[in-house]
C-alpha cells in the first residue's frame, strides 16, 4: 500500500511544479510573487511554442522558517516555462532597455475559444499576455537558495 507524501517529506528540496488548470496556476502565482528578472532573461521560442523566464524567486515557502529562526530571507533562481504558446503581447515594456529589471506580481489565466490567455502582471503597470492553446506551465528551481540582497521579505503597501 502506498502512502501519501507528507509536508515534512519535502524538506528543502528544489521545487518542480506543473500547472494545467487555473487553480494550479494560482499556486505558481503565489510562489513567483515578487520574483525579479532582467528583461533579457525572457524568451519566446516561436517554433517550439514556448515562453520562458529565468527568475530570481523569493522563497515564500521558506519565509516562516527564516522569520522564526531569525535568519535572512532567501531567493532562488527558477525557470518559469509555458508551453503551447501561440503568441506573446506585452504592454508598457521597453524591450530595447537591456538594463531593465522587471518584477513579477501575479499570474492569471482566462480561458477563451482558442485555449486561453495567461497574463503575467508586472510592477509598474506592465503586462505580458501569452495566448496559449492549453494551460501548460512549469516552475523549476535551478539553483541553490541564496540570501536575498535586502535580507528582507517583500512588502506591499495597499
Image (cartoon, rainbow, N blue to C red):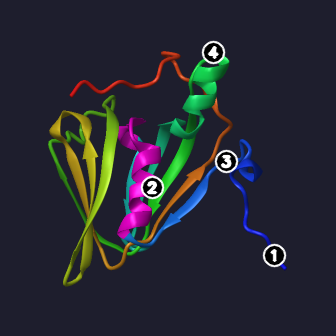
**Bounds of the magenta span?**
22-40
> Are the two marked residues, 3 and 4, in contact with CB atoms closer than 8 angstroms?
no
x and y percent of residue 43 in the render? Answer: 39, 54
x and y percent of residue 92 in the render? Answer: 15, 42
Q: How would you rate the neighbour count of disc 4 (Cα within 10 Å): few for under 14, some for 14-19, many for 20 or more?
A: few
Q: Which residue is mark 4?
A: 70
Q: Is residue 86 left or right of residue 12?
A: left
Q: Which residue is mark 3?
A: 14
**Mark 2 vs mark 3, CA separation in Å:** 16 Å
**Mark 3 vs mark 4, CA separation in Å:** 22 Å
x and y percent of residue 64 in the render? Answer: 57, 30
Q: Indicate which disc, 4 or 1, sits on the residue closer to the N terminus.
A: 1
Q: Is residue 24 magenta?
A: yes
Q: Is residue 150 left or right of residue 11?
A: left
**Mark 2 vs mark 4, CA separation in Å:** 26 Å
Q: Secondary structure at mark 3?
A: loop
Q: Nearer the viewer, residue 61 or 98?
A: 61
Q: Is residue 32 magenta?
A: yes
By secondary structure, the bulk of the magenta-drawn segment is best described as helix
Q: Secondary structure at mark 2?
A: helix
Q: Indicate which disc, 2 or 4, sits on the residue closer to the N terminus.
A: 2
Amino acid at each position: 500500500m502506498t502512502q501519501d507524501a507528507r509536508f515534512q517529506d519535502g524538506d528543502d528540496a528544489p521545487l518542480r511544479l506543473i500547472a494545467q488548470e487555473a487553480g494550479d496556476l494560482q499556486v505558481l502565482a503565489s510562489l513567483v510573487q515578487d520574483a525579479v528578472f532582467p528583461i533579457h532573461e525572457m524568451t519566446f521560442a516561436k517554433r517550439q511554442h514556448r515562453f520562458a523566464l529565468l527568475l530570481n524567486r523569493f522563497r515564500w515557502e521558506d519565509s516562516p522558517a527564516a522569520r522564526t529562526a531569525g535568519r535572512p530571507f532567501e531567493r532562488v533562481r527558477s525557470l518559469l516555462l509555458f508551453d503551447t504558446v501561440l503568441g506573446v503581447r506585452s504592454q508598457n515594456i521597453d524591450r530595447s532597455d537591456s538594463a531593465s529589471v522587471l518584477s513579477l506580481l501575479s499570474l492569471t489565466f482566462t480561458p477563451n475559444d482558442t485555449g486561453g490567455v495567461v497574463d503575467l502582471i508586472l510592477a509598474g503597470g506592465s503586462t505580458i499576455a501569452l495566448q496559449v492553446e492549453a494551460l501548460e506551465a512549469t516552475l523549476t528551481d535551478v539553483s541553490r537558495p541564496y540570501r536575498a540582497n535586502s535580507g528582507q521579505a517583500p512588502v506591499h503597501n495597499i
